[in-house]
Image: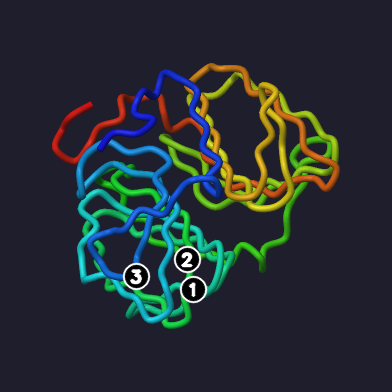
Amino acid sequence: MDKNANFDQRAAVHSDQEPWIASPMKGVDRRPLDRIGAEVARATSIVRYEPGSAFSAHTHTGGEEFLVLEGVFQDEHGDFPAGTYVRNPPTTSHTPSAADGAIIFVKLWQFDPEDRNQMVIDTHAQTPQPVADGVCEIPLFKDARECVRIEIWDPSVTVQNADHKGFEALVLEGSIEESGEVFEANSWLRLPAGALLSATSGPKGARLWIKSDHLALPQTAPNGGV
């Protein structure tokens, strides 16, 4: 299954308008945002765990990062309530579940194979720092390949940037408008490297998960396909 697999093009998904697609595990459903590959894939998705559901034990050969959007996500390492950001680099493993249900935003097979930075961050416990007029930031992860953060935009703020090597955002709260398109909670936008970002927050502002500078290299699937 390929979805939004051309990383030289703008891509947008309003996930709340998309159907849930069943995974191989009962009670675990997905809304794909971008994907290259079959069941094992380079993928960006929103995943819903029904109460009491679980996924089988697995190793993250290509790495996994996720942000808990609703509920409490769990594995043998602990409980991760809404707002928790987790990076499980290549070679890590776990058995995920959600006793009371959870929804997560997750990215698979998008790590440097040598990355071993495992981390858990409660984003709601962090103090945002101002980075521009009307914009604050909660840093999550940064290396030579990518920059991941939460950004909080004041109401009616316009943010412009063409000096990036790829831009991706998931709206967590509030809304933004980009290219005449309104993105509300759970809507996702991806721009190719060097494309002008010109977005304006709505009347209630916006809270965004953002990754940038990660599309400079060809995006490959687990089987080596581009």
Three-letter code for the amino acid on which mark 2 is drawn = Val
- Estimate how packed mark 2 is, as few (under 14), some (14 to 19) or many (20 or more) residues with alpha carbons within 10 Å: some
Rounded to the nearest angstrom, the CA distance separating label 3 from label 1 is 19 Å
Please indicate whether residue 120 sits to the left or right of residue 122 in the image: left
Which residue in the protein does label 2 denote?
Answer: 120
Q: Position of residue 152 (x, y in %)?
A: 73, 47
Tell me which label, 2 or 1, sits earlier in the chain.
Answer: 1
Which residue in the protein does label 3 denote?
Answer: 27
Contact? badges 3 and 1 (CB < 8 Å): no
Q: Where is residue 218 in the image (x, y as percent from the top left)?
A: 30, 25
Question: Residue at coordinates 48% horizontally, 46% vertically from top-left?
Answer: 18
Which residue in the protein does label 1 denote?
Answer: 80
Mark 3 or 1: in front is: 3
Rounded to the nearest angstrom, the CA distance separating label 3 from label 2 is 25 Å
Q: Nearer the viewer, residue 194 or 96?
A: 96
Question: Residue at coordinates 47% horizontally, 66% vertically from top-left?
Answer: 120
Tell me the element at label 2: strand
